[in-house]
Image: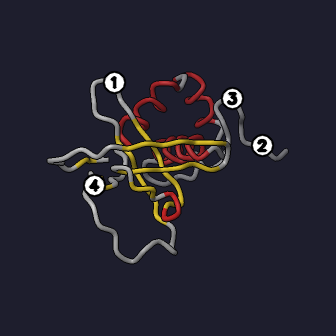
Amino acid sequence: MIPTSSSELRRVRIQATGPTARLEIDDRDIADQVRSYELRHTAGQLPELQLLLRPTAAPEWEGTARVVVGEAPDPGPAAAAFLRALDPAETERAVLARHDLLDGGPHEFTRALLAQLTEWALGVRQPGEHEAVDG
């Protein structure tokens, strides 16, 4: 999330009681217009309240709010963590055991390696599980 700058903060009050909550912004109860809310607070930063309005919410809403724009997460750190967690010997054994390794095509080992990593990343098979060999 990328927050935009806000010149004015709003007073927020949430009273959650079981499955319902009273949600006030600057002493104005808006709970009947909200489908869900998420309150995030990271140490050293201002809290952020994100609201998802109901389809029946008033077509006009007046007030000041801190606007956040969703941004797709960067897959690099997750991919790096996934690759660091793999055992090189187990990865090599899994790739060498693949039925599609010896297809005679160019770059067959690299293609088989990438296919193996993709399957593991998608949870098709996990490290330590080998493909069934017909015999």
Q: Is residue 63 left or right of residue 79?
A: left
Q: Are marks 4 and 3 in contact (CB under 8 Å)?
A: no
Tell me residue 47's x, y (percent).
Answer: 34, 36
| Residue type beneath disc 4 | Ala
Query: Mark 3 packing: few (<14 Cα in 10 Å), some, or many (20+)?
Result: few
Q: Which residue is mark 1?
A: 43
Q: How far separated are the C-alphas under marks 3 and 1? A: 39 Å
| Residue type beneath disc 3 | Gly
Instruction: Determine the residue positioned at 54% across, 47% down.
Output: 115
Q: How far separated are the C-alphas under marks 4 and 2? A: 56 Å
Q: Are marks 4 and 2 in contact (CB under 8 Å)?
A: no
**Mark positioned earlier in the residue sequence (1 or 4):** 1
**Mark positioned earlier in the residue sequence (4 or 3):** 4
**Mark positioned earlier in the residue sequence (2 or 1):** 1
User: Which-is-in-front pick, marks 4 and 3?
Assistant: 4
Q: How far separated are the C-alphas under marks 2 and 1? A: 49 Å
Q: How far separated are the C-alphas under marks 2 and 3? A: 12 Å
Q: Helix, strand, or loop for circle 2?
A: loop
Q: Which residue is mark 4?
A: 65
Q: How far separated are the C-alphas under marks 4 and 3? A: 50 Å
Q: In the picture, which quadrant includes the C terminus?
A: top right
